Image (cartoon, rainbow, N blue to C red):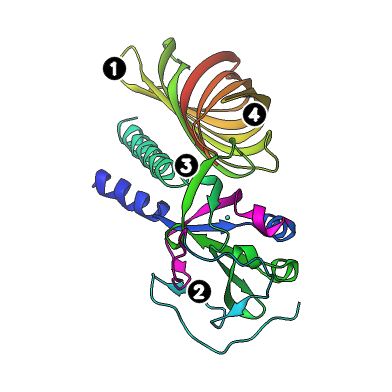
């Protein structure tokens, strides 16, 4: 039953990466004002997930004639995204005008679900290609805007069309395609982290060490600064063989200004409210903490994170060390 639940959550959170890549509006504008003979040399793209897809276009090759004369987009649809990889749609032509036992078992299940979610996100969002590619100058650019859906070769994209378009994508199967390299780690936007390790846990029998986890869901308004909701479950066995549960919910502020190649770092502060349950009952307390974070960049959206912290609660100071994956 637990395995089935983990698989179900993973399926909901996961998605299949496609061969369709989005061009941001800023990049589309930049391309439109770049000399046509140069713009295909370096195009910033972000891989899309499975879903609606534009109609396939004729494949260009090294033998395709290059025409640098700008033109407005050729409208071939009504603006709706189409599912799958069907043939080219035809339509009216025209131009345009201008993101304790039972308690312990329940906690372990939730931790397993959180870990499963992290693995799935790392395999999809974390591996998503976000970087630069070199394409043929006549590579088809799929565009949506007030006019509907249309296509224009990259070399013939004009500034008016770029400014009016609401979405633009290209497909790697529609012409020569060379990946030039991923963009550096970019935390800006939503984030998810799953970290696991060990922490000091106080109880009626003194202090001991047990497994501790941090499940973090947050948002980074900018690359170095983030705000995260944190769930911290921990537990250990006591001197009588029973389980001491230590659970916390809180907010964390991250500041990671250090970038040295693939290595990144900084610190955090947090505040939370917690519950500790042992054979003597349940205690409640407010927590404050701070510590250091180090990250090893794997891709533009995926990093290994190490977290080393000091927390004060129940009139005691405890430490913990965890490591895991962060997905952005």
Reading the chain from its start, which is encountered first: label 2 or label 1? 2
Whether tag 4 and tag 2 are in contact, CB under 8 A, the answer is: no
Inter-mark Cα distance, 2 to 1: 59 Å
Tell me what residue is drawn at x 61 percent, y 39 percent: 186
Disc 1 residue crowd, few under 14, some 14–19, many 20+, Cα 10 Å: few
Callout 2: SS: loop
Give left or right: position of 177 versus 108: right
Q: Position of residue 40 (x, y in %)?
A: 60, 54
Inter-mark Cα distance, 1 to 3: 40 Å
Give left or right: position of 188 versus 2: right
Residue named by callout 3: 126
Q: Is residue 166 magenta?
A: no
Tell me what residue is drawn at x 60 percent, y 57 percent: 23
The disc label shown at residue 81, or none: 2
Disc 4 residue crowd, few under 14, some 14–19, many 20+, Cα 10 Å: some
Above or below for 295 versus 189: above
Callout 4: SS: strand
Residue named by callout 1: 241
Inter-mark Cα distance, 4 to 2: 43 Å
Above or below for 220 versus 268: below
Comparing labels 4 and 1, the label whose residue is closer to the camera: 4
Viewer-nearest residue: 313 or 328: 328
Whether tag 4 and tag 1 are in contact, CB under 8 A, the answer is: no
Residue named by callout 4: 270
Could you tell me which quadrant the C terminus lies in? top right
Q: Position of residue 124 (x, y in %)?
A: 42, 47
Q: Give the range drawn in magenta.
A: 34-62
Reading the chain from its start, which is encountered first: label 4 or label 1? 1
């Amino acid at each position: 039953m637990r395995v089935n639940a983990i698989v179900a959550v993973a399926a909901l959170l996961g998605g299949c990466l496609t061969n369709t890549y989005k061009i941001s509006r800023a990049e589309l504008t930049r391309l439109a004002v770049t000399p046509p003979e140069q713009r295909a040399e370096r195009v910033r793209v972000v891989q899309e997930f499975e879903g609606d897809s534009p109609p396939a276009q004729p494949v260009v090759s090294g033998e395709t004639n290059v025409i640098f004369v700008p033109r407005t987009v050729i409208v071939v649809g009504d603006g709706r995204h189409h599912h799958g990889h069907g043939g080219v749609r035809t339509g009216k032509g025209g131009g345009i005008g201008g993101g304790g036992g039972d308690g312990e078992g329940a906690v372990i299940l939730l931790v397993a679900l959180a870990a499963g979610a992290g693995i799935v996100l790392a395999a999809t969002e974390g591996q998503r290609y976000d970087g630069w590619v070199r394409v043929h100058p006549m590579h088809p650019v799929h565009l949506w805007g007030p006019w509907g859906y249309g296509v224009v070769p990259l070399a013939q994209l004009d500034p008016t069309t770029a400014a009016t378009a609401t979405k633009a994508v290209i497909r790697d199967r529609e012409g020569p395609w060379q990946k030039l390299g991923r963009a550096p780690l970019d935390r800006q936007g939503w984030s998810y982290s799953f970290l696991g390790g060990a922490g000091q846990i106080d109880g009626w029998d003194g202090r001991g060490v047990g497994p501790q986890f941090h499940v973090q869901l947050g948002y980074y308004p900018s690359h170095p600064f983030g705000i995260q909701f944190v769930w911290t479950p921990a537990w250990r066995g006591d001197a009588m063989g029973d389980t001491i549960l230590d659970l916390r919910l809180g907010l964390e502020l991250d500041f990671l200004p250090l970038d040295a190649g693939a290595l990144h770092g900084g610190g955090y502060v947090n505040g939370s409210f917690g519950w500790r349950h042992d054979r003597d009952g349940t205690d409640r307390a407010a927590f404050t903490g701070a510590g250091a974070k180090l990250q090893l960049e794997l891709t533009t959206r995926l990093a290994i994170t190490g977290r080393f912290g000091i927390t004060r609660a129940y009139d005691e100071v405890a430490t913990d060390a965890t490591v895991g994956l962060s997905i952005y």
